[in-house]
Amino acid sequence: MAFDGITIANIRKELDDTLTGGRIFKIAQPEPDELLLTIKNNGAQHRLTLSASASLPLIYLTGKNKTSPMTAPNFCMLLRKHIQNGKIISITQPGMERILNFEIEHLDEMGDLCRKLLIVELMGKHSNIIFSSTSGVIIDSIKHISGLVSSVREVLPGKEYFIPHTQDKENPLSVTREQFMERVFAGNMPCFKALYTSFTGLSPAIAHEICYRAGGNADLSNAALDEDGRERLYHSFQEMMEDVRTGSFSPCIVYENNAPAEYAAVCLTSYPENARKDYTSISLLLEDYYAEKNTITRIRQRSSDLRRIVSTALERNVKKYDLQLKQMKDTEKRDKYRVYGELLNTYGYDVTPGSRSMTALNYYTNEEITIPLDPTLTPGENAKKYFDKYNKLKRTYEALSQLTLETKAEIEHLESISNSLDIALKEEDLVQIKEELIESGYIRRKGGSKKVKITSRPFHYLSSDGYDIYVGKNNFQNDELTFKFAVGNDWWFHAKGIPGSHVVVKSRGEELPDSTFEDAARLAAHYSKGRGQEKVEIDYTEKKNVKKPGGGKPGFVVYYTNYSMMIDSDITALEQIE
């Protein structure tokens, strides 16, 4: 997931093909650390996003516009003065550094042609956008870095621009075989780490891919490779560098558990093909990847208040349940006290006054037992004392029997809401979950506010055999799917014994093929607390066997006739309709 030197090389080629020779039509600065350039070239208009954000530095072509502030920042005004209507002469990348240099030709105040450099450094928290002369003198930058901030390099107007070399790494495009062998096999570390710590522009993901293509284990120590293994690693490395030199890129995103996990400018063959989405444009890839990641991050942030409410309530109920179980265990001795009382009433006449115990035959077990006595009380009073203890524990047991069921049901309900929050992808999904928490009494509805309109809908998938499969995103949707949408001979799936979504397969009155049963079971596993496990047990039955008990909480059902299967939770091969 690194914005590495190979990704920059792919972007450079794409921008060179698209923008070189074009004129900068508009310059905007929608964010303090971001520029949006509009460039006209070959009769087309292109937007280029340049972001020096410390958390997410990016550069890519986009079709989207952004609202700019009413008053343009100073850096934006400076660029407009110098390079608006300027012509992009070249776009270069020094070595495999995470840097792009835009050489721009423009007219100065006297009307003479001159050139400037717009340098985009994409180096994590050290990212910057620097405007300089071709001789290397900084004119200005989007971030000013003084000597108080960095002892390595000052980025201020009038200072000389240079690339800081803080790490001792080789350029992978120009390294010789001897240098490769010397650098990669110098120490004792995993092969993939030896690669990305030795060469500029290689991320751990790319290093893993090189090792995989060489037929080796990326985590294997470099010291464990024999001569043949070293040669294979070198040739795999050189083949990838040749692709970079010739611009033969194959950008892709790989997914894990239906979420974007990694991307690269080369094909990541170490991942299964069905977990990989290929792109023809690195800009499209970056826009899609970070849009998906941003959506997930934003939903996590928006759901934080709901998560806190659910987590607090869950913690409180778990503590209450543990205490109730402990109290329940204490009531187990109630029958012993009843027997003590009965035996004292039966044999107590023979007890010597002041005795501290009595031995008698327990006619329930035909065994002798010793009953402790209070010497200050008569046998009848001791019997009454034991009956009082028995009756108190009996009442406690009867009350706790109901209370523990209620508390356990509340815990299961809260865990199911927690699972709903985990699978929520849109803000409208959160609206329905919040409504459930309001109706359950965990959130107070704001005075006068009406019940919100629900627009969230269940997930809709298509099985490998063409059958429609629906997955509830929350308990309200689970109830609606199971009891309003599904009909008697549709099939119903749910993870066994753990919180999860209701999954319904529309059978169309036909007998389902085995592969559709497996597809639906995988969805039930994926949209449950068992997501990510190698095997999850799934119960499945016809919908007519699923019942809603009276007074049951949202999403709670019972069924007594079912089949079960063990399945993984990988749904990457399934087609999602909506």
Image (tube, rainbow, N blue to C red):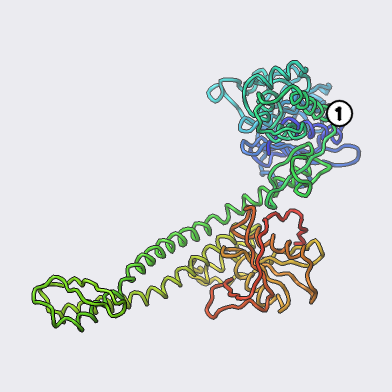
**Mark 1, secondary structure of its residue:** helix
**Nearest the camera: 495 or 276?**
495
Q: List x then y, in percent, for residue 276.
A: 77, 46
Residue furthest toward the left?
353
Q: Residue at x 47, y 68 (%)?
A: 408
Relative height, residue 417 to residue 148 (above, below): below
Residue 103 visible in image: no
Can residue 96 be seen in this snapshot? yes
Residue 70 shown left or right of residue 414 in the figure: right
* Amino acid at the residue labelled 1: Thr
Locate residue 530, reporting x and y percent.
Answer: 60, 57
- Depicted 94 relative to depicted 414: above or below: above
Using residue 457 as the reference point, say whether residue 358 is left or right of it. Answer: left
Tell me where residue 20 appears, x and y as whole percent. Answer: 85, 31
In this rendering, would 152 be left or right of 390?
A: right
Residue at 46 percent of width and 62 percent of height: 313
Q: Quarter of the image for the N terminus: give it.
A: top right
Asked which quadrant contains residue 12, the reply is: top right
Whether residue 266 is situated above or below residue 470 in the rendered picture? above
Residue pictured at 88% horizontal, 37% vertical = 41
State the image quarter where residue 304 is shown: bottom right
User: The C terminus appears in which quarter of the rendering?
Assistant: bottom right
In the picture of the structure, the residue carrying the numbered disc 1 is 246
Dot 1 crowding, Cα within 10 Å, few <14, some 14–19, many 20+: few
Residue found 33% across the figure and 74% down from its top: 396
The answer to which quarter of the image holds residue 282 is: top right
